[in-house]
Amino acid sequence: MAAHEAAYYTRRMNWLKKFLPRRKAATQTRRVPRAEHPISRSSFPSGTLRTLYGLKDAGYEAYVVGGGVRDLLAGMEPKDFDIATNAHPEEIKRIFRSCRLVGRRFMIAHVRFGDEITEVTTFRGPITDSHERDETGRILSDNEYGTLETDAFRRDFTINALYYDIRDFSIVDLVGGLEDVAGRVLRLIGDPELRYREDPVRMLRAIRIANKLKFSIDKATAAPIRKLAPLLREIPAARLFDEIIKLLQCRDAEANLNGLREYGLLAQLLPQADKAMAKPQSADFIARALRNTADRIASEQTVSPAFLYAALLWPAVVARMQRLIEEEGQHVNVAIVQASEEVLAQTQKYVVIPKRFSLPMREIWTLQPRFDLRKGGRQQRLLTHPRFRAAYDFLVLRAQSGEIEQAVADWWTRAQVGEGLPPLPPEPDLETEAEESSDGAEPGGAPRKRRRRRGGRNRRRNSTQPAQT
């Protein structure tokens, strides 16, 4: 962050601490006029402003709410801006031709202006006995509308219940969120255990938001998490896949992983990864993978969920592969394929990994034994594999964590630029067919013979596949 930006954000926080009284009337509605807060309309993208004014001009209330207001007050650049209104979804759709309604549990309007999509929600009503719940208390249906006041108390954390009013540019706070931004505290609205039971994903959000903002979690908010962690098993596995990406494919991934372990949440999401974290070498490998991802995000490079999940589950794949080799005498190429399938099948019980990511994960894993094969044409065939770059980056992390010799990774680094290659320790005593890819083995474990290629017509060109794909 540049020095002038840091000074600007420091002034914002100093304003909060100086202006706001102590938290003794937190439940009283407070409206802070524009002259007394630092948020300007210029902070909002044009699509958000057009949506706000479109609702206002149609006679409805319209507020920027949630993370956008929170992040601006906390001195961070928001990723997106959401709007809350008293207009119902069908009314929003009539105002904006580019509007699309999504969601079943709670209907949301997506308003598009150019490439920008603004999410608009109708004020939610209070929780009543009419809300459909499952046996754990999780709310299953929530399409009941309310007022600004009921909407504020339905939100998860106090700092997410701050409303910027487009009519007079004031900030409305009904739950003490301004005090918590100033005190850098993350606090649930209402009874923590009840709120977690309504939506267990709030436990994951608490970890992520606290680390993103560098806030502390209020003691009462943190207290029930470990006990209620098993409630995550009730969440659809596809939704948990997305939540893990939010937690671990970001700059705060390492802190988030530590938080998940501290509160017993990782064991409910990825038990195989949680078990691996108890071993220093595996923990170091996973931590390096998360730092690698964070560095790529910071430098605006592409990142892939496939690489992330491959790293999280690799220790489990290795452990299973070694057992298959030692106990059943399987060839390494057969063992790595079977281990990959078994680990993925076990993971799918908790988190559904889409095929567009699980297939690259398998390739990254099953290419690892081939880095031990460097004779003849094996080197060139591996260098031209479309998944080589991601598998090579994976190999480097393995070397850095001490799983394999650094000399192996260095050899392949030099091989890519055609430099003179230093000698390495003897290759493993593998059959000639070991060079085949994982899908080149027959079900019984016998390697399948490779058909000789004629000429070079069908050979792949050198891969330009970027890392983490």
Image (cartoon, rainbow, N blue to C red):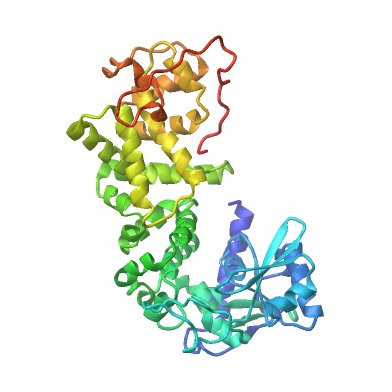
Residue 320 x %, y %: 26, 40
Whether residue 284 is visible to the viewer of this picture, yes or no, is no
Seen in the picture, residue 257 relative to 176 is either above or below; the reply is: above
User: How many marks on residues?
Assistant: 0
Q: In the depicted view, which residue is nearer to us: 183 or 403? A: 403
* Residue 439 left/right relative to 81: left
Q: Residue furthest right?
A: 57
Which image quarter: residue 335? top left
Residue 304 x %, y %: 51, 44
Which image quarter: residue 122? bottom right
Q: In the depicted view, which residue is nearer to us: 366 or 394? A: 366
Seen in the picture, residue 33 relative to 352 is either above or below; the reply is: below
Q: In the depicted view, which residue is nearer to us: 406 or 384? A: 384
* Residue 52 left/right relative to 255: right
Residue 383 x %, y %: 49, 21
Residue 15 x %, y %: 59, 73
Residue at x-position 36% and y-position 69%:
231
Seen in the picture, residue 435 relative to 247 is either above or below; the reply is: above
Residue at x-position 44% and y-position 67%:
201
Whether residue 302 is visible to the viewer of this picture, yes or no, is yes
* Residue 437 left/right relative to 171: left
Which image quarter: residue 433? top left
